[in-house]
Amino acid sequence: MEKFILALDQGTTSSRALLFDHNGNIRSVAQKEFTQIFPKPGWVEHDPKEIWSSQVAVAAEAMSKISINGSYLQGIGITNQRETSIVWDKKTSEPVYNAIVWQDRRTSSFCDELKEKGLTEIIRKKTGLVIDAYFSGTKIKWILDNIKGARARAQKGELAFGTVDTWLVWKLTQGRRHVTDVSNASRTMLFNINTLKWDDELLALFDIPIAMMPEVASSSEVYDYTNTTFFASKVPIGGIAGDQQSAMFGQMCVDEGMVKNTYGTGCFILKNTGHKPFLSSNNLITTIAWQINGQVTYALEGSIFIGGAVVQWLRDGLGIINSSAEVEALAAQVPDNGDVFFVPSFTGMGAPYWDQYARGIMVGISRGTNRSHIARAALEGIAYQTMDVMNAMEADTCLKITELRVDGGASANNLLMQFQADIIGIPVIRPEVVETTALGAAYLAGLSTGFWANIDELKKQWQLNRRFFPKMSKEMTDSLKVKWADAVVRAKSWSK
């Protein structure tokens, strides 16, 4: 009987399930969008129950498409939107509040207080992170401070915290396992990436009881088995990684110096820095990529908050396209951006600026500007942000990056990928399987359950789809870079 690995890819705007065969091919996929909740400007929430129900629904759909049940599964891998924070009752599994999403900015003022107290460097040395509302620690504190009775219940050991991976494992095992992996733990601002433990000093700083925190495990091991009637058999849960680390593993960026960018809701550029944490001097963050067989791999990361989400905004907010797929054809109707520059900092700026108060801005609009120019400027804004992060990476490591591996939904956009190669001046490499986030989770689960023997076997599965070479003149790229930098300055600190 042919076996499969089920990858649960729980993203920011949708839940997905993919079934992979032994050759690393996708045999079935299902996807379901879920509700985005915006209670106030800058606030972003999800319903944890809807996250769970949508994830279960797509898992069932993916299996039904090829007429299999849980007995055909060798393992389950989980990859998830990172930093998004959920707190629930350990007895009832009822969330005490909505999930506070990684994009949420409600704790920006508290982050400012931490900076004013001079805590930037101690937090950076312990966690590899900058102080920002992006990470989980301040979100947990907000829930404990603002939900009636939550802090008292947490101190009694009645409440559990988890990022989305933890929530899914909890639900899959019916509360039997409260666990996360090192990659997700490293995004909380509470985990010491040197000792690989929850940090008592940081927990005290945020006033978060240790009893809330999940056990931290490696990224590839059998954590437990499903304990629901849904799979009709007990299936090992064998891999967990945050979405960007999972994509990096799916891209087989397993050697030091390799770089990938995932074009999802946001854009996330990660560079493999080997087995020791490398602290950035250029506002990048240090993160744990994964831990396999006891060996931790670290990465430098530049997080861009708005990537593909700008295309969603063109569709839902501006209404100039009916579907995201239309944006490339619309942008291709003009030869250039018509001197329009679009900085899509709708929820602040991530790396390398880390401006919580920046907001989106479009400059250079004239009477001749049309919707094609706006579409092109939006796509180019994604590429410029990537360029800024890669420049910071090169400055940190004093090493020239020679290629960029790309994946995620927007990597299918040839116009964007060509412009990306033009503006960074190096080849952009797209693999045959661009679903590398789910693939990475499948690989991690497959390694722990014996589906694949080792990483060398996985490397042989990576296949090239297309290589984009730079074509634009240096004179043109230099001119564009100057105007982009000017537009960024104008977007900074807007809401402050």
Image: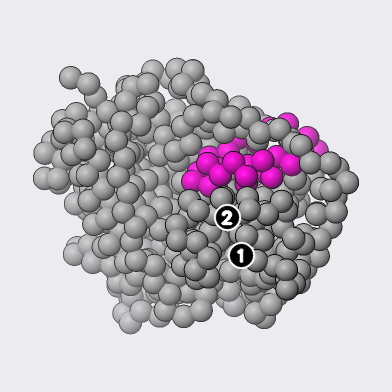
Q: Mark 1 points at which residue?
A: 371
Q: Which residue occupies the extreme right position in the image?
A: 475
The amino acid on which the numbered mark 1 sits, given as a three-letter code, is: Arg
The amino acid on which the numbered mark 2 sits, given as a three-letter code, is: Leu
Position of 315 with respect to 148 (left or right) is right
Q: Residue at x 39, y 72 (%)?
A: 37
* Disc 2 to disc 1, C-alpha distance: 8 Å
Q: Mark 2 points at which residue?
A: 330
Q: Where is residue 242 in the image (x, y as percent from the top left)?
A: 45, 46
In this rendering, the answer to whether 79 lies above or below 439 is below
Q: Where is residue 76 in the image (x, y as percent from the top left)?
A: 29, 37
Quadrant, the C terminus: bottom right
Q: Which residue is drawn at 58% across and 29% down?
A: 466
User: Quadrant of residue 323 in the image?
Assistant: bottom left
Q: Residues within 10 Å of mark 2 (few under 14, many from 20)?
A: some
Question: Bounds of the magenta span?
Answer: 398-422
